[in-house]
Amino acid sequence: MTIKELIEILQKHPNQDAKIQVIANPSINGEDEQVVKGDKYARKCDKCGQGMNEGFCIYEGQEYYCSDECLHSVYSEQEWSEMYNEEDNGGSSSYWTQWEELEEDYQYQIINGELEEIN
C-alpha cells in the first residue's frame, strides 16, 4: 500500500482521534502485503453504515442508529418517544447508550478503509 492510498483511506474516514495501524503480512509469494487497521466500533448504524460506540439501541438490539438524524429518518419523534417510554417487561427495550471500551464489545473495525465485522 502506498502513502497515497493510505491518505485516501484516511480522507474517506476522517476522525481526529483515529488510531491507524499498518501491519505487514507475509504473502505466499514472499512479498509483504500491508493491511491498514483503524478504529474499532461496538455497533454499526443501520441507516448510514458508520461504526458507532454510542447511539440508539432499538428493541434490545434489533436496530442501531448513531445519531438523531439517522434515528428520525426511520422513526418520527413521536414513534421514538413511544418506544422509549414503553413499560413492557418492566422497562423500555429502546434506549440511547454508550458501549464500554472493552475488547469483547467491539464487533467492527476499519480495515483497509472499509468497516468490517470482526466478531
Image (tube, rainbow, N blue to C red):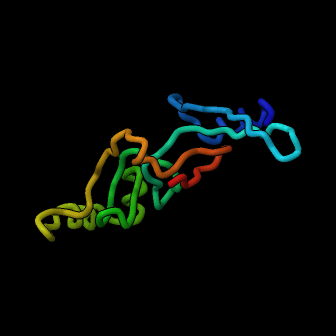
Residue 21 lies, with reference to residue 66, above or below; the image says: above
Tally of marks: 0
Q: Nearer the viewer, residue 85 or 108?
A: 108
At x 19%, y 63%, the residue is 92
Q: Is residue 13 left or right of residue 90?
A: right
Q: Nearer the viewer, residue 29 or 96?
A: 29
Residue 111 lies, with reference to residue 75, above or below; the image says: above
Q: Is residue 29 left or right of residue 63?
A: right
At x 46%, y 61%, the residue is 46
Quarter containing the N terminus: top right
Give residue 113's quadrant in the image: top right
Q: Nearer the viewer, residue 35 or 9?
A: 35
Which residue is the extreme one toward the right?
29
Give the x, y percent position of residue 79.
27, 67
At x 67%, y 33%, the residue is 22
Give the x, y percent position of residue 60.
30, 63
At x 21%, y 61%, the residue is 84
Give the x, y percent position of residue 90.
11, 65
Give the x, y percent position of residue 55.
36, 50
Give residue 12's quadrant in the image: top right
